[in-house]
Amino acid sequence: MTLCTPARTPNRPRVQRPHSPPGGARRLLPAGADVSASLAVFLIALPLSLGIALATGAPLQAGLVAAAVGGLVAGRLGGSPLQVSGPAAGLTVVTAELIQRYGWRATCAITVLAGLAQLALAALRVARSALAVSPAIVHGMLAGIGVTIALAQLHIVLGGTPQSSVTANALGLPAQLAHARPAALAISALTVAVLLGWPRLPGRVGRLARKAPAALVAVGGATLLAVATGLTVPRVDLPSWSSHALPGLPDGPVLGIAAGVLTITLVTSVQSLLSAVAVDKLVAARPDRGHGVPRSRLDRELAGQGAANVVSGALGGLPVAGVAVRSVANVSAGAVSRASTMLHGLWIVLAALLLVPVLDLIPLAALAALVMVVGIQMVSITHIRTVTRHREVVVYAVTLTGVVLVGLLEGVALGIAVAVAVAMHRLARTRITREELGGRHLLRVRGQLTFLAVPRLSRALHQIPTGSEVTVELDGSFMDHAAYETLNDWTSGHLAHGGSVELSGPTGGRITGSPADRAPGAESDTNPGPSGDAPRSPHACCRPWTPWHNHQCAERPAPPVAPAQQPPVRTGHQLAHGIGKFQRNTAPLVRDELARLAREGQNPSQLFLTCADSRLVTSMITSSGPGDLFTVRNVGNLVPLPGEESGDDSVAAAIEYAVDVLRVQSITVCGHSGCGAMQALLGAGPDDRATPLRRWLRHGRPSLERMANRRHAWARISGRLPADAVEQLCLTNVVQQLEHLRAYESVARRLADGSLTLHGMYFHVGEAQAYLLSGDEVRGYDDVFDSVPPAILAARAS
């Protein structure tokens, strides 16, 4: 990760990162939790590695090589300390096809080239781009691979041999069922029964038994059955390591080899990066909240996977990727460092060298049944429900079908094409309806209002009779320039001919300052103002698509009113003028809601802690209304650690009241660009006079220390480094104040029982763009603040 040194500021020495983390020398021996976790992962990885090698048609030793390299190389060099890498079921189809087409030695060379490509991508720092792939495509790809694996392994389960394609396996299944071999079927049935039943053993005995991995128990039980009964079934046959095949130069069409390299690169990279993000979430959800475990660094993780693939291919191993099953076991077993991953690789090496006679007893039918169950589980019902809820089931289905019938790369390409088409359809889908209610014309616009909808919008507008009363109801979060100009020009003409126009939102509430607020005959957008200045738009009040001037909406002179009717507002008194405007325009719209809140009391959903900066309008940037947010503002959005308030308990009192009394569901700490408090922190010197502001800003010193501490990854904003030291400190301060929040007893208690979540937010004032700290419970990766579309931001705030 590229580090930026904070800019030099007057009266303050340059901050330098220490060369070693606090706490003295590094631990030489692994922690006991890492040793026990490595054993648990080893017991799962050993049978799975053999089974995946069997499913691909590669030498069985290749699975052990990939598992060992994944643990030792990817575990040491990768950016996700607790992720376990090795041969993955998601690569089975790709590897099997390459072996069938080019041979095993050429496939090893292709794996080396794919690793080099991953190293190049890591050098370009594009790891986070892989997260832009739609989850529906990823889930569909994995499901298609799972179907392919299950159909192929089912033939081995029945005692036969799989065919070369999914279609052939499906068509040949009836004949295979008719000629099933009882011995192989019995071994497979026992393996499947143990795999499915072992995690569901009831009672205290079952709870103790479940500590042993189901995969190991299933394969071990099947092996004991085969040995005890003397069943004649094909078994594992590990040849001597002296005859182990190493890579050779690929012999085939260049485009085909390049396609193979590209496929392995993309599949291993996307799977590993998504798995790393999932591991971060699992670590954050542990009872210890991942204390001491750094977040994943995705570019480093991609480089580690590339190095592992280079080494694995060079040693005659399968392609390597981050594996979810083993990673989950590692996190659940309480691993605290990368030592557990590396030790698991060491145990694999020892087993491959010392346990060959034991491994040769394992029936191939047991391994096939194990991989078949894994393939079936890759078609996740939870994923199907998720994509259905997000209306992306078409993308999922097309990707799955394409992977099964055409091929992996082709299926993913089809999924991407359908995902783009669905996104374009949603963007272009705009429903415009017109009806007349009680002499007033109502024009409803549903969806995003873009240039694609301008012809239909213009046609509907010009069907409205001249001089009539019109309400235009807009239900969408976006209006482009072409649509705005069309609506603006028509409104000007309609008003000029004596009509009235009112703009309203989806609930029917009037948008303040709509063209209907103007008196008939007022100057239109096409006519200059009295002074001959630029034309004045009829949309000159506060709405989502109009500018603000000095935080006050542009005003129009009110029509002449008799002196007795004029409101008692002093000219030039901005506060009184604003209050008067609220009473006239806004109060009638919110009176019913405020009356309800007055009766029922407040029930906010979140505590929103932000800076006192006047440019931060919390209700605007969160699309919230009365009763939604319990807001606390102070200089620098600081959260003093418990016991360090020195007489000022205001923030601690607000946290206690919000968490224990109001029972908010989340707490958001929101920083912003150009924060004066952060600038003051950077410019503070040791001899500065202890003013009240300086005394308060001492609570921000841990943020300075965090920014200077090399143990903490530097915060990023949408993948880029901050523009300067001030922005870096603004971002780091949000992360640090979230850590302070966890020190409060009431917050820690609610976090532990899962009834409270923490969120970090950064608002760039100049860009009018909000960013959320990635990851659940503020445990993101590399402290990255990602931009959020307005609709999602509003949903988070509600």
Image (cartoon, rainbow, N blue to C red):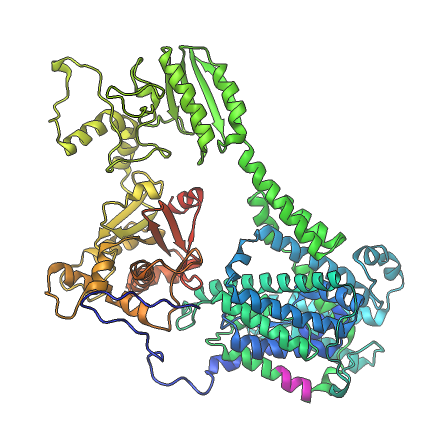
Above or below residue 497? Residue 736 is below
In the rendered image, residue 226, in percent from the top left (x then y), is placed at 79, 78
- The kind of secondary structure the magenta stretch mainly shows is helix
Q: Is residue 516 visible?
A: yes
In the rendered image, residue 21, in percent from the top left (x then y), is placed at 35, 78
Residue at the (24%, 34%) spot, across then down: 552
Residue at the (41%, 29%) spot, across then down: 507
Q: Picture quarter containing residue 601?
A: top left
Q: Picture quarter containing residue 748?
A: bottom left
Q: Which stretch did the figure color magenta?
A: 348-353
Q: Is residue 330 magenta?
A: no
* Residue nearest the observer in this picture, 659 or 50: 50
Q: Picture quarter containing residue 224?
A: bottom right
Please identify the residue farthest to the front as the structure is shown. 532
Position of 118 compared to 534: left or right?
Answer: right
Above or below residue 636? Residue 39 is below
